[in-house]
Image: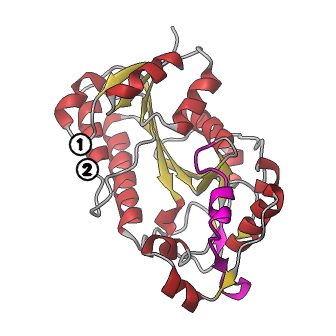
């Protein structure tokens, strides 16, 4: 029998996973928008209309698939992820054998540019990251309670030239500045195709209740990443500004990204999931 996979939040990465599977698994996808059903069917997916904010719409998910890929983000406010709570309550009636969750490397908070791995103590500094920490805790508890193999993928910035917003050319064209080198922060990246491959491998090989950093081999300052994208796109390199100037000119969301610096180890990704990166640096992926 073919494996049955349920994707929660089948956007760009989810569709890349579907393309990788190429009909070898039967794939279902939960969508809150009935208008997306035709596109999902065209991709070879069985669409299920439901909303993670409305638990009554999730009853049919129980026992539907033996594998679950949870790519849906939490709501935009609060410190807990109620959407994941609703999903797990529905799945608990007939738990899957494996569940993979797309978390974020923001759960580590600011590491001062240190090189870290998955054993780093979590220190979320924004509600956005706290919601992810809450989701991870819920998922690990679910896995222990129901015997489900849960793998947490901690994901940094996702890019790909064919992904909406996945290339910096639009931001470069708008003249978005970056921090000067002495104020800059380290940032981490993963190509969307490599992320999709990591999702499939985690479903197959992820260890129980295990976190894995899904990042490439690069160790780039954010400004250098912008410069690289500008050079490849044939656009001017962005303006460099001080942190004080940034506080005056940039919004709270952008400033939150500029307040965290870390370099991630991907040794566990390569050793346990055995992923051979197709794009080991953004210089190749862009």
Question: Is residue 109 a member of the stretch shown in magenta?
Answer: no
Query: Would residue 204 be visible to someone looking at this image?
Result: no
The location of residue 158, given as percent across then percent down, is: 61, 51
Q: Residue 173, located in which quarter of the rendered image?
A: bottom right
Q: Mark 1 — residue? A: 53
- Compared to residue 255, the image places residue 38 above or below, namely above
- Looking at the image, do the residues carrying marks 1 and 2 touch, with CB atoms under 8 Å apart? yes
Number of the front mark, 1 or 2: 1
At mark 2, the secondary structure is helix
Give how far across and how far down residue 244 sits, in percent.
Answer: 55, 91
Of residues 130 and 73, the one nearer the viewer is: 73
Residue 279 in the figure: left or right of residue 5? right
The residue furthest bottom is: 244
Q: Earlier in the sequence, mark 1 or mark 2?
A: 1
In the rendered image, is residue 137 in sight? yes
- Residue drawn at (42%, 37%), measured in percent from left and top? 9
The crowding category of the residue bearing disc 2, from other C-alpha atoms within 10 Å (few below 14, some 14 to 19, many at least 20), is some
Q: Does residue 204 lie above or below 258 as drawn?
A: above
Residue drawn where x is 42% and y is 28% of the image: 97
> Does the magenta segment cover residue 173?
yes
Number of callouts? 2
| Label ID, residue 82 | 2
Position of 239 relative to 157 (above/below): below
Which residue, as the protein is rendered here, is positioned at the far front?
Answer: 174
Q: Decide if residue 19 is on the left or right side of residue 99.
A: right
What segment is highlighted magenta in the picture? 163-187
- Taking the spot 57% from the left edge, 89% from the top edge, the residue there is 245
Query: What's the CA distance linking mark 1 and mark 2?
Result: 8 Å
Classify 256 as above or below 56: below
The location of residue 251, given as percent across then percent down, is 46, 75
Q: Quadrant of residue 128?
A: bottom left
Residue 175 located left or right of residue 10: right
């Amino acid at each position: 029998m073919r494996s049955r996979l349920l994707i929660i939040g089948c956007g760009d990465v989810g569709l890349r996973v579907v393309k990788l599977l190429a009909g070898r698994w039967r794939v279902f996808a939960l969508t809150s928008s009935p208008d997306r059903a035709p596109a999902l069917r065209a991709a070879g997916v069985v669409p299920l209309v439901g909303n993670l904010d409305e638990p009554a719409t999730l009853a049919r998910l129980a026992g539907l698939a033996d594998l679950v890929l949870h790519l849906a983000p939490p709501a935009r406010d609060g410190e807990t992820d109620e959407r994941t709570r609703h999903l797990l309550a529905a799945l608990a009636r007939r738990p899957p054998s494996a569940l993979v969750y797309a978390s974020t490397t923001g759960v580590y908070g600011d590491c001062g540019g240190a090189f870290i791995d998955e054993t780093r103590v979590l220190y979320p500094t924004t509600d956005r990251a706290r919601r992810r920490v809450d989701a991870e805790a819920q998922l690990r508890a679910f896995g222990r309670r129901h015997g489900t193999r849960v793998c947490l993928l901690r994901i940094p910035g996702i890019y790909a030239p064919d992904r909406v917003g996945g290339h910096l050319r639009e931001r470069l064209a708008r003249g978005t500045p970056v921090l000067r080198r002495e104020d800059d922060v380290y940032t981490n990246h993963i190509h969307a195709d490599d992320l999709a491959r990591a999702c499939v491998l985690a479903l197959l090989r992820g260890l129980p209740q295990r976190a894995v950093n899904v990042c490439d081999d690069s160790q780039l300052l954010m400004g250098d990443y912008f410069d690289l994208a500008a050079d490849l796109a044939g656009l001017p390199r962005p303006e460099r500004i001080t942190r004080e100037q940034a506080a005056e000119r940039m919004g709270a969301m952008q400033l939150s990204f500029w307040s965290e610096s870390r370099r991630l180890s991907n040794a566990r990704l390569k050793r346990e999931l055995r992923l051979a990166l197709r794009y080991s640096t953004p210089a190749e992926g862009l």
